[in-house]
Image: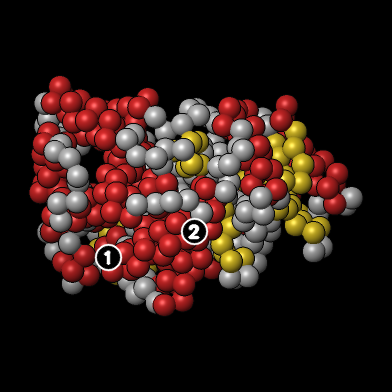
Amino acid sequence: MQSAAIEQELKKLFYNWSGEEAEMVLPLAPSGSQRIYYRLQKGKQSAIGAFNPDFKENVAFLTFSRHFRQKELPVPEIYGENLDKHVYLQEDLGFTTLYSYLLQAGDYFPDYLVQIFKKVVEQLARLQIEGGQELDYSVCYPRASFDRQSILWDFNTFKYYFLKLAKVPFDEQLLENDLHNLAEYLLQTDCSHFMFRDFQTRNIMIKAGEPFFIDYQGGRRGALQYDLASLLYQAKANIPQEIRQELLDHYLDSASAMVPIQRETFVRYYYAYVLIRYIQVLGTYGFRGLYERKEYFIKSIPFALRNIKWLLDNQLIPIALPELQNALLHLIESKQFEPFDKIKATSSLLTVNVNSFSYKNNGVPEDNSGNGGGFVFDCRFIHNPGRYEPYKKLTGRDESVVNFLQHHSEMGAFLNDVYRIVDAAVEDYIERSFTHLMVNFGCTGGQHRSVYAADMLAQHLKEKYGIQIVLNHIEQERKGWKN
């Protein structure tokens, strides 16, 4: 379905719910799935619209949501749906995710964040135990439970999209033996509760200091340990180990008030579930990063491997998995996914000039460094938001334009290729003590696509290398950003 048709269907749902016509329909930043989210608003009335072409996922999400709301669990209210058109409307829980709190905190983990996480694990226990009672598991998709087949799927993704693409040597039969031994062990614990499946900080909204959960359409029956492992060992969350232990204890206190739990047994299985969660995560990073070449997922790999190293160093895996352990140790010791030495990069003399420009007005910028130019990337093939009236006077820095380019254009794939090409040049120039590199992005008017692309590359290089960046938006600066 085209974006205009999606927006029209969501507007109908908004009108049916609020009795008013939405005056704003804003596409939100993309998720890692086919789902597209919009914020619809009229005055103080606001809702989140979703389009998802996967019918069965929609049925699961809507069924779970209504069931959880009846049990007064912290999930969004469903305002309306049209399953034939693959759209639904839900409560707007605001802009703040738990992940944004982690980004603000940086490497420091303050007490206020610990208190928020304690609320999260308390509500997680309720969702799993109370929410799992009388739940219609027949709508679960693609499996009704996290069973042997689910584990096999995760492991095969890890094997073929991560280990194979990373060129890790292993004996396939011995690795299969380890997999089946691990699956058998995991399924010996209590697997009778609701398992969120992707319980991580991006799926936790914070509203008025309280946590709310979203995106649980992949939920199924499973073990309590899996979701807790997903949260506390999220690759980039970087939660200190002593705080992980404090939150584990707090979770067990909350869950034990609802069902009998043998703590020592729970913890023994818990670390095995940390391992299987990392197997699932690395499979996803392999597919999204190594296969689809999406930079964000590649950058997450070292964080996951460091946590796996901690598990192995502390001998927390409760059963022998020799071939799997050898493969993981090979990954860790090879350091192939460790980022470029940022100290070397920041102490280099390299300056990267990043420009956006207009082909129509002033053309490719001159290189005043004396090196005769650099990379020139043509953005004109990318779907142009400037063709549409709401975006004509905006630029590539406005939120609605950013979301348009992320959702309704090829910009993401284009930038992934740009990063790969420019990163290679940057690393080579640092090694060879070069002092200058120029990168230009052009589009028709130098207003939307080239501005966004230049901003994204400048941000990417600054975060990854810490090198000196000079960013110029030639056409927009000439016009004083007035369009």
Query: What numbered label is drawn on residue 257?
Result: 2
Query: In the rendered view of the protein, which quadrant contains the C terminus?
Result: bottom right
Residue under numbered circle 1 = 241
Q: Nearer the viewer, residue 136 or 51?
A: 136
Q: Residue furthest right?
A: 19
Picture mark count = 2
The amino acid type, in three-letter code, at marker 2 is Ala
Residue 224: tell me if it is visible: yes
Q: Position of residue 399 (x, y in %)?
A: 60, 59
Residue 301 falls left or right of residue 232: left
Element under label 2?
Answer: loop
Query: In the rendered view of the protein, which quadrant contains the N terminus?
Result: top right
Element under label 1?
Answer: helix
Q: Is residue 325 above or below residue 249?
A: above
Who's the residue at 43% across and 62% down the image? 253
Comes first in the chain, label 2 or label 1: 1
Residue 457: tell me if it is visible: no
Q: State the image quarter where residue 186 is shown.
A: top left
Q: Is residue 373 above or below residue 82?
A: below
